[in-house]
Structure formats: structure tokens, C-alpha cells
Image: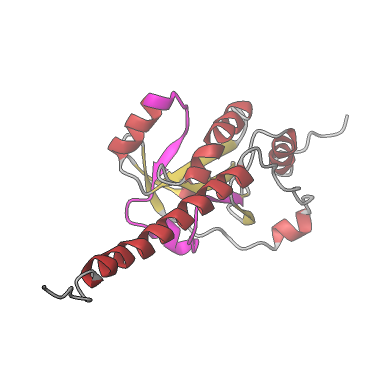
Amino acid sequence: MSEEKPNSVKPEKHNFIKWLIPLALFIIFIIGLVLSWKQNTGSKFKQLPSLNPEQIQNAELAPDFEMLDINGNRVRLKDFRGKAVLLNFWSITCPACLMELRSLASLSEQLSGKPFALIALTSNSRGDIKEFLDETGLKLPVYFDITGEAASRYRVYYLPVSFVIDPEGRLVDKFAGAADWSDPSVITYFQKLIELYQPKKPSP
């Protein structure tokens, strides 16, 4: 009678363990992603600080950089001087970024006609973004950080992240994470920032 080889099942067990660890890590990643989505869904914009003209006067100038608009034209941040600017770094591969896009579009629409500019800056290709905008119907002023110069100068290590720049080009504030940019408090915030630089009407 032939003897059973005790080591004959070891390769199968080894292969099972080999695949079990990556599978467990993948499941943990998916659970974390789902929890992140639940945490960010319906999130409220954090309370905005009051605008202190003296503090703004002492703020540093926002780093200038070159970008491309949706048509491929070269634009610089300094070209937006005279307007309050919301500089938003985002990507179509970032779930949290996608959650706030409609509120960003709403903010831009509500402040249309005022000295305000939204710069939705991405490193995605123009082709991918054009297709994305066509599919979603979003009217978003998208610009492209093709070389990564802007992300480097603003030390962007995660997305989304937004920077508020006053009409004189000073870096006023920074906000990390997805937010409801269409909230009335946000509109009021930018209206006050704009008013700080409007010529005062002479008293009668």
C-alpha cells in the first residue's frame, strides 16, 4: 500500500495564503472608501472666518503660475488681478472632488457679473475633461496644471483643496476637503471680500 505524502497539500495552502493577504487589504480599502463617502456626503462647509482688512493687508502674495484654459490658451494667475479668486485643485479620479463640483459651479453662477473668478485647476488631460463636462453638463471654468507647477508651488499633497485670493493677489485663506460652496455663508464671504476693494462712493 502506498504511503500518503504529508507535504502534498502544502503548495495549495501556500497559494491560498498568498492570495488571502492582498484580498484582505483590498476589502479593508473598500470599507475605508465607503466610510469616507458616507462621512463626506452632505458635509457642511466649515464656518468661515470674519474678514479682517488689516490681516488681509499683511497676507503674502499668492504664488503666480502658468496654466492652460479649456481651449489651450496660456493664462497666468496674475491675469485675474482685480477679482476675488477661488483656486480649487481637483481631479476626475477624486471622489471627494466630484462631490463638490456642482456647488462650485453654483458659486460661479451666483457671482456671475461680479469681480470674482473660479479657477477649477486639474492635472487631467483636456480631452478627458471635455468628455467629462459633456457627460455631466457642468458649466465649470476649468484650467489645466499640465506641468504640475501650481500644485508644487501651493504644496498640494491631497485633493480637493482650495485657496482664496483677494483682488490684489494676496493669499487670504486655505480650505481642505470637499465643501458645499453654494452655501449662503460662502456667497456672503466672497461678496464681502469683493466689497473691501470696491471704490467707495463719495458722500453727498
The span picked out in magenta is 135-164
Q: Position of residue 63 (x, y in %)?
A: 50, 60
The answer to whether 87 appears left or right of 135 in the picture is: right
Q: Which one is nearer the viewer's eye here, 54 or 162?
A: 162
Write the residue at 38% across / 48% down. Answer: 67
Q: Is residue 72 visible?
A: no
Q: Position of residue 127 (x, y in %)?
A: 28, 36
Q: Which one is nearer the viewer's eye here, 137 or 188?
A: 137
Residue 93 part of the magenta segment: no
- Residue 26 versus residue 5 in the image, above or below: above
Q: Quadrant of residue 92?
A: top left
The answer to whether 157 appears left or right of 166 in the picture is: left
- Residue 60 versus residue 203 in the image, above or below: below
Write the residue at 43% across / 26% down. Answer: 136
- Where the C terminus falls, by quadrant? top right
Residue at the outermost left position = 1
- Residue 153 versus residue 36 in the image, above or below: below
Q: Position of residue 130 (x, y in %)?
A: 34, 32
Q: Tell me how many marks there are.
A: 0
- Where the N terminus falls, by quadrant? bottom left
Q: How is the image coloured?
A: secondary structure
Q: Is residue 38 visible?
A: yes
The answer to whether 11 appears left or right of 40 in the picture is: left
Q: Position of residue 45 (x, y in %)?
A: 69, 44
Residue at the outermost right position = 204
